[in-house]
Image (tube, helix red, strand yellow):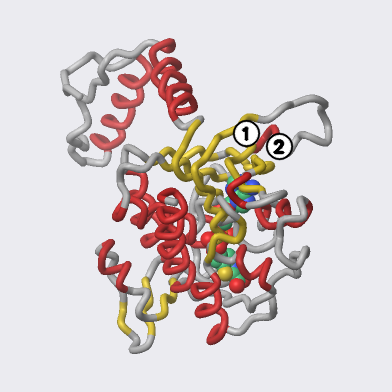
């Protein structure tokens, strides 16, 4: 943006004059900053509208058929998108997040503390991201969880083949018969979406139909149960597609056991849908780990490889 001297508006000129005279009365020189003569390039309101909407609707058009749809942009979903960017950057990845802010539970450590604990060897991803940490032996500590989350996010979103649809909830799954899977075989073939504000208003309005995205493979990273959490596996259970039929809910906290089980259990839970992160604990009844984040990172990265394998089948 060019900085060209321009006359001050009457009101800012009056304020500046008042400030200057106050400073002068106090015997101080007027304050100058590098932005005193700042001038914006011109803009029109319609241009701003079109700059946003043209891109959004072009993205909706392009991503109506995505290679991978990741549901949930928490630590597991973001780690999955990061690894996809490393191993298969050509894939079209739609990242669906019901909140305005992606990041899920990873903006903080535990409770409302700012630091994040990552158990080794998951810290290798921090090295790849060049996120600094303090080495505590078996684990590392990132001073601000927000630094890791924002760095991960910026890597993911720089990939032109990734589109974040935030403030957009996945309300349901697309499920199709798949003769290749034998009689009665079904596979997940995409997601049913709605802007979150619409999804939240279903109880008060009628007939607000959703939208859809077809996917080669869906990675469900919805986190543990909550207002939106575990949407993927809860829906699979209602469709009779969860082996065993139920979603028992996560087990009690056991850090030592929990992280390994999340990583080891990361899998394509039904054809076309890979499950990662804490949503796995919901369907397996395995323990929660609380504020250690190594498993979310490695589970998300493992899920990326499984998604690529599912696409190549
Ligand atoms: O908003 C959710 C969050 O950002 C988003 N999400 C959930 N359901 C969705 C839906 N459509 C779109 N239907 C949806 N988005 O998914 C994200 C989940 O992130 P998360 O941080 O809650 O889950 P994670 O599995 O990546 O990490 C979990 C970390 C742990 S462990 C733990 C414990 O043991 O207590 N608690 C947390 C938060």
The image quadrant where one finds the N terminus is top left
Q: Residues within 10 Å of mark 2 (few under 14, many from 20)?
A: some
Residue 144, by quadrant, is bottom left
User: At numbered mark 1, what does the secondary structure look like: helix, strand or loop?
Assistant: strand
Instruction: Give the residue drawn at x 65%, y 63%.
Output: 224
Q: Which residue is mark 2?
A: 199
Q: Nearer the viewer, residue 286 or 74?
A: 286
Q: Is residue 53 above or below residue 147?
A: above
Q: Nearer the viewer, residue 295 or 192?
A: 192
Q: Is residue 17 above or below residue 259?
A: above
The circle on residue 129 is none
Instruction: Give the residue drawn at x 36%, y 43%.
Output: 91
Apparent side of residue 203 relative to residue 285 in the rendered image (left or right): right
Q: Is residue 161 above or below residue 110?
A: above
Q: Nearer the viewer, residue 12 or 285?
A: 285
Q: Is residue 122 above or below residue 99?
A: below
Residue 37, image x, y percentages: 20, 24
Discs 1, 2 touching: Cβ within 8 Å: yes
Q: Residues within 10 Å of mark 1 (few under 14, many from 20)?
A: some
Residue 51, image x, y percentages: 39, 19
Residue 193, image x, y percentages: 63, 36
Q: Is the CB of the residue bearing disc 2 within 8 angstroms of ligand 1?
A: no
Instruction: Give the residue drawn at x 43%, y 66%.
Output: 297
Q: CA distance from mark 1 to mark 2?
A: 6 Å
User: At numbered mark 2, what does the secondary structure look like: helix, strand or loop?
Assistant: helix
Apparent side of residue 252 relative to residue 295 in the rendered image (left or right): right
Q: Which residue is mark 1?
A: 195
Residue 150, by quadrant, is bottom left
């Amino acid at each position: 943006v060019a900085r060209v001297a321009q006359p001050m508006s009457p009101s800012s000129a009056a304020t500046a004059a008042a400030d200057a005279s106050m400073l002068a009365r106090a015997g101080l020189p007027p304050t100058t900053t590098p932005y005193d003569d700042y001038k914006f390039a011109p803009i029109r309101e319609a241009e701003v509208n079109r700059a946003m909407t043209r891109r959004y609707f072009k993205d909706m058009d392009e991503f109506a058929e995505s290679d991978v749809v990741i549901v949930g942009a928490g630590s597991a979903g973001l780690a999955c998108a990061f690894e996809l960017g490393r191993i298969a950057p050509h894939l079209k990845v739609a990242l669906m997040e019901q909140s305005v802010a992606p990041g899920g539970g990873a903006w903080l450590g535990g409770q409302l503390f700012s630091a994040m604990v990552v158990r080794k060897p998951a810290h290798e991803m921090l090295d790849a991201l060049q996120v600094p940490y303090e080495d505590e032996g078996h684990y590392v500590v990132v001073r601000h969880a927000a630094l890791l989350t924002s760095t991960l996010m910026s890597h993911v979103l720089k990939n032109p083949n990734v589109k974040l649809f935030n403030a957009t909830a996945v309300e349901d799954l697309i499920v199709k018969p798949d003769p290749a899977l034998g009689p009665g075989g079904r596979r997940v073939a995409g997601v049913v979406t709605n802007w979150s504000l619409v999804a939240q208003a279903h109880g008060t309005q009628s007939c607000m139909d959703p939208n859809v995205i077809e996917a080669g493979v869906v990675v469900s990273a919805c986190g543990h149960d909550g207002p939106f959490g575990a949407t993927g596996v809860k829906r699979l259970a209602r469709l009779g597609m969860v082996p065993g039929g139920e979603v028992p809910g996560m087990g009690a906290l056991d850090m030592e056991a929990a992280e390994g089980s999340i990583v080891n259990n990361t899998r394509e839970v039904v054809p076309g849908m890979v499950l990662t992160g804490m949503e796995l604990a919901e369907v397996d009844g395995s323990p929660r780990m609380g504020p250690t984040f190594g498993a979310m990172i490695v589970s998300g990265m493992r899920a990326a490889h499984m998604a690529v394998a599912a696409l190549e089948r």
